[in-house]
Amino acid sequence: MEKFESVEAVLDFAIEREQEAVDFYEGLAEQADNAALEKTLTAFARVEAGHKQKLIVAKTYGAVVESRGTVVDMKVGDYLVPVQAGPNMTLQDALIIAMKREKAAMDMYTDLAAIVDDSDLNALFTKLAREEATHKLTFETSYEENFLSEN
Amino acid sequence: MSKLTFTLNGKPAEASAGETILDAAKAAGFFIPTFCHREDLKPFASCFVCAVEVEGRRSLVPSCSTEVAEGMVVNTENERVKGARKTCLDLLLSDHVGDCLGPCMTSCPAGIDIPGFVSHIAKGEDQESLKLIVDNMPLAGCLGRVCTRPCEEACRRQLVEEPIAICQLKRFAADQAIANGEEVEPAKLPGIGKKVAVVGAGPSGLAAAHFLLMFGIDCTVFDAHEAPGGMIRYGIPSYRLPRDIIDGEVAVIEKLGAEFKYNTRLGQDITLEQLREEYDAVFLGLGAQKASGMRTPGEDLPGVESGIEFLGKVSRDETLPIGNNVIVVGGGNTAIDAARTALRMGADEVTLVYRRAREQMPAWAEEIDAALDEGVKLQTLAAPVKIEQAGDQLEMTCIRMELGEPDASGRRRPMPVEGSEFTMTVDNIIAAIGQNVDATMAPGLELTSWGSIDANEQTGQTSVEDVFSGGDCVTGADIAVNAVAAGRRAAFAINQFLQGEAVVGDPKGYNHSMGALDEVPADVPAAFEKNNRVPMPHLDAGQRAKTFEEVETGFTEELARAEAARCMECGCRDAHECSLRDFATRYDARADRFGGDRREYRRDDSHAVLVYEEHKCIQCGTCVRVCDELLKSPCLGFAGRGFEARIKPALDRAMVLIGDEDLPSLAEYCPVGALTLKTDPVATLEPEAFLNTKED
């Protein structure tokens, strides 16, 4: 765990992941044939850019990464078949991709929290995991309202 | 007589000496609203809605009592004047109590004349009833069976006991025509030499064709299926909607002049570009016929299909084989239809699996009850996780759900209970969890992020100006009456487009309402005695569960008359002549701009022929002056002062005690619906009113 020897290093890592997410959704947006869906995916990218900015502020000013309360895990995306991004993808596809991506990030931080010895780092990873859980919940709520309304 | 010259709205004008601005402006072709001015009465200048601007005067002046002077510069239509009129109207509306149109009519997406057709049925005028319906909406028999009845949710009768069975009465009117061998044809204007391609013979396409033909526009209707109806044929089982009812109502549209071309798929047999070249405009009513899919592993195994595929197949052949044990996933109307259909096809056990609680099922409560009565089992708070092949059968693993704590919106969302997985072994799995739009067959149109067609809500016009669209392909899967309403709106817009007019759809006039059910004055329902809704006769559960015979057998004449007689006839007798409503529409007035108390509901129908509704009076004083100046009888007068001023019968007696034989003429003078004749019906649509849509 040398890589995560300090809070700063952890935040750098998390900032990189958020940038990857920005790039990912921008890439998805470019692939979409439907202009309105492209806009929606671009909005996803902007949200991720916001998350990145929040982490940069935390790193620069030594602010605490705030994430309070219990985040509900509806597990809506957990049981769904993964989908491949492509020009014909639908909003339903895009939300499945997003839910699964956020779950992967949440699981990663949860795992990292479990293996670091330093209590500050453990607390930070736990908070980051909770942040990702919040993002996942946003997509799950949208999926539930829009694609599970009759289910 | 010498003429005065003055300036009216920036142009030179003339008036006779002593002539009022109102009369001079009217003679010059300008409209000035007024409530209190009558040519046979002395000027009164109380309503001030006729106010105009005279340059050099600080305040606006009442045009009804201000005489034109030489060299006067008058503005009757500038923003200051319009603003003053709107304020005046907003104030009058702020305490007005009443309905222009009944809440049933305003809540019906298709805007049909409900009090009108119900009233005809009550009087035994069934043909007139159906005529009134079909002039404003096609598919009366179909919607009379399958509509989810937003009108009944708004029906005031539920404040007495239960809402009127509006939909079932509509079905009665349609069924009576069939039973009596009568043909009721909608009104139709002469042809205008234009033709429109309608793609999709579902509710929106059929409605668009119906109204386009009434406007005198030729229509060809293309559909990918072998028969018309779209979702009402391929998504609703015949035990709810017999196919001969669909065929009969489509035949009316065919008789109006529609040409139908079936087995013709857009994007395959015809293209949008071809249609645009061959026709003057195109209407797309493509529906939302692509199943959403559970996205669960194993969903593509044989024996698993979507609700819409299943219902479509059965619609073509009701004798298809099905396994003994069937699971239907979902809690909407399609899931209920699929479950009840599976029973009728011979399944011994049909289980509905739904991930929330029963109270949250979006299906119609009556349909859920009917399904349970027939033997359908309900497994709530369970969600499918995976499906696997198990020999000749399918094994579906579900996880139990529990409702979580209420979230910020107050909703309790279903959450999986860890480790609660269980399996069910069945022969067939039908997933009825929703439908999506597939608009890829109409390239070139802007779509929403949902993949539905992006069309103007009021007109249905798409990003391509000669292509209009409506129904499920715009809104996503929705109720049939909304699709019919969208087809109607688009037909209005297409007619405007083809005539070179502004494309605005079917704009509605101002409508005042007493408000939501809990805002209705208690005296309104208190005037009616309790008389419960007539239940719809139906086949017993045991008798019907294994056949496709229609479950609801329809009202007899006796039952229909009794049910129709329950109608409270909400709505105003004067709505089509009411000046307040007319001016409110012209000046975009609103009832909610100013707060404050509303008037007290006081209805006096003690007079033999006249009804006085004090809560609708605007205090213009016309009736008082008619009594004084024309009838020479002080039978009506002002009581109280300022905001408390009210017009009342002399000595505050009931109207019946006045007894003046000329009193009925007051109804003619009242510019709103405060004084009306009992013999006048409540506001209804004129049978062919919509065919005369151009403003005068």
Image: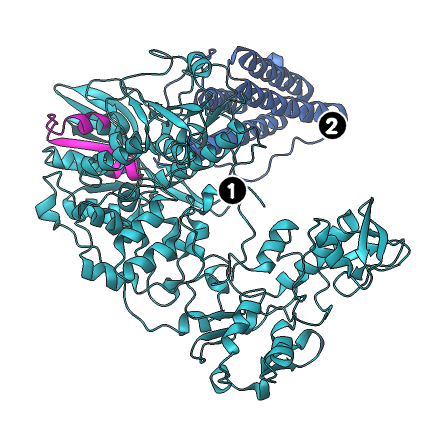
Chain colours: A blue, B cyan
Select label 1 or label 2 by which is in front. 1
Relative vertical location of residue B14 with respect to residue B672 in this rendering, above or below: above
Q: Position of residue B83 (x, y in %)?
A: 74, 52
Quadrant including the N terminus of chain B: bottom right
The answer to whether A94 appears left or right of B3 in the picture is: left
- What is the span of residues highlighted in magenta in the rendered image? B312-336
Relative vertical location of residue A147 with respect to residue B560 in this rendering, above or below: above
Q: Which residue is mark 1?
A: B693
Label 1 environment density (alpha carbons within 10 Å; few <14, some 14–19, many ≥20): few
Q: Chain of mark 2?
A: A
The answer to whether B173 appears left or right of B47 in the picture is: left
Label annotation for residue A62? 2
Residue B422 falls in image quadrant: top left
* Residue at the limit of the structure toward the bottom, as seen here: B651
Q: Chain of mark 1?
A: B
Q: Determine the residue positioned at 37% across, 56% down.
A: B116
Amino acid under label 2?
A: Gly
Query: Helix or strand or loop: what does disc 2 sit on?
Result: loop
Q: Nearer the viewer, residue B57 or B72?
A: B72
Q: Position of residue B149 (x, y in %)?
A: 35, 49
Magenta stretch: residue B506 in it?
no
Query: Helix or strand or loop: what does disc 1 sit on?
Result: loop
Relative vertical location of residue B37 with respect to residue B370 in this rendering, above or below: below
Amino acid under label 1?
A: Thr
Q: Nearer the viewer, residue B494 or B199?
A: B494
The answer to whether B493 appears left or right of B367 in the picture is: right
